[in-house]
Amino acid sequence: MKRCFVGLIVLFVFVFPFTAYAGAPSDAINDTANKVIAILKNKSLSAAAKKERLEVIYKRMFDEVELSRFSLGRNWKRLNPSQQQEFVQLFRKILEKAYGDKILEYKDEKVKITGERMISADRAEVQTKVIGSSKEIPVFYRLRLKDGEWKVYDVVIENVSLVQNYRAQFKDILAKNTPSQLIETLRKKVQ
């Protein structure tokens, strides 16, 4: 259950928009986590209203194109530009569908930043722990500086990368199917 919540926290960062800004990458994660938790704790908001507010945060926090491109890996180039655009939209909807309701199961967990590592001048990793009543779960956010804002392009929960997990699934699909068939499969999953 705790791992599921951590996955939701990670995905809310990917799937629900948060405010990111130039400055220390950890500041961007901390600011976003605080905003998300405030929304989740707000008992006056309906579940639908919470989802709407979280979605706005997600769009500002995530680099959806990078997340999608990295999730497809080398197969990204097999998609034509219109397929790439549609893939980005469908992938976001799949993440929302998979984690949207679960994030609302928040039970007063805390997010603590435990470190930050600059990978390059425009890439960083922020290490956090999601602290629950009985367990601490490590969650790392990988960000890149894009247009003056730190944007998330991968989340690693308990050493499992969101990008690598989906890349393996998409690779399997594309080993037997065309890019058009992949897009059609994703359309069906979203419905």
Image (spheres, grey):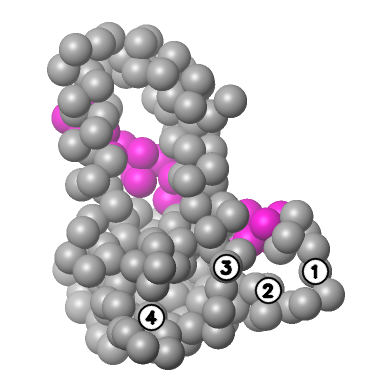
Which label sits in the foreground, 3 or 2?
A: 3
| Left or right of residue 94, residue 6 in this image | left
Secondary structure at badge 1 equals loop
First of labels 3, 2 by sequence position:
2
- Residue 13 lies within the magenta run: no
Q: Nearer the viewer, residue 85 or 45?
A: 45
Spatial CA span between label 4 and label 2: 17 Å
First of labels 3, 1 by sequence position:
1
Secondary structure mostly taken by the magenta-highlighted segment of the chain: helix
**Which residue: 27% across, 77% down?**
138
Q: Pinpoint residue 88: horizontal percent, then vertical percent.
A: 45, 34
Within 10 Å of disc 4 (Cα), the crowding (few <14, some 14-19, many 20+) is many
Spatial CA span between label 3 and label 1: 14 Å
Q: Which residue is mark 4?
A: 130
Residue 191, compared with residue 65, is above or below; it is above
- The circle on residue 39 is 2
Secondary structure at badge 2 equals helix
First of labels 4, 1 by sequence position:
1
Give the amino acid type for the residue marked by disc 1 in the picture.
Leu
- The circle on residue 105 is 3
Q: Which residue is mark 1?
A: 45
**CB within 8 Å, label 4 to label 1:** no
- Residue 60 lies within the magenta run: yes
